[in-house]
């Protein structure tokens, strides 16, 4: 299980992913890059044995399907799931307080 410093890094990454998602909704190349970054984040969570968070990220990847020439159909759903993941990480960090 991650220590406080690692939780801070996880929070930073999920916050960046939330912003990146908002910036890439209408841009196919950026959307694919977001999906790739989310996959790397998933692997990192699994390596850190954060399986509950990893499962939630896997859910996001399951509904995130970049399509060339169209706007993201699941943008609001993905955004909501990312925000809930971020909130869970914040609660974990608050537990160290």
Image (cartoon, rainbow, N blue to C red):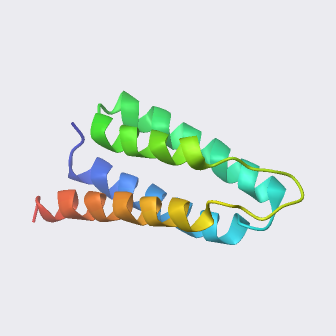
* Image quarter of the N terminus: top left
The residue closer to the viewer here, 45 or 4, is 45
Residue for point 56% across, 41% down: 62
Q: From the viewer's perspective, is residue 36 above or below residue 93?
A: above
Q: Quadrant of residue 97?
A: bottom left
Residue 18 in the image: state x and y as whole percent.
52, 65
Residue occupying the far front of the picture: 73
Q: From the viewer's perspective, is residue 34 above or below residue 97?
A: above
Residue occupying the far right of the picture: 69
Residue 15 in the image: state x and y as whole percent.
46, 65
Q: Quadrant of residue 44?
A: top left
Q: From the viewer's perspective, is residue 2 above or below residue 96?
A: above
How many discs mark residues in the rendered view?
0
Is residue 12 visible in the rendered image? The answer is yes
Residue for point 11% across, 59% down: 96
Residue for point 72% across, 65% down: 24
Residue 67 in the image: state x and y as whole percent.
80, 50
Q: Is residue 19 left or right of residue 87?
A: right
Q: Is residue 30 left or right of residue 77?
A: right
């Amino acid at each position: 299980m991650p220590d406080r410093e690692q939780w801070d890094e996880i929070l930073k990454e999920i916050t960046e992913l939330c912003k990146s998602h908002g910036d890439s909704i209408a841009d196919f190349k950026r959307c694919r890059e977001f999906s790739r970054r989310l996959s790397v984040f998933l692997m990192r969570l699994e390596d850190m044995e954060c399986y509950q968070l990893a499962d939630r990220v896997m859910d996001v990847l399951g509904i995130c399907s970049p399509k060339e020439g169209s706007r993201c159909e699941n943008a609001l759903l993905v955004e909501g799931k990312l925000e809930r993941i971020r909130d869970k990480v914040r609660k974990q960090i608050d537990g160290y307080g």
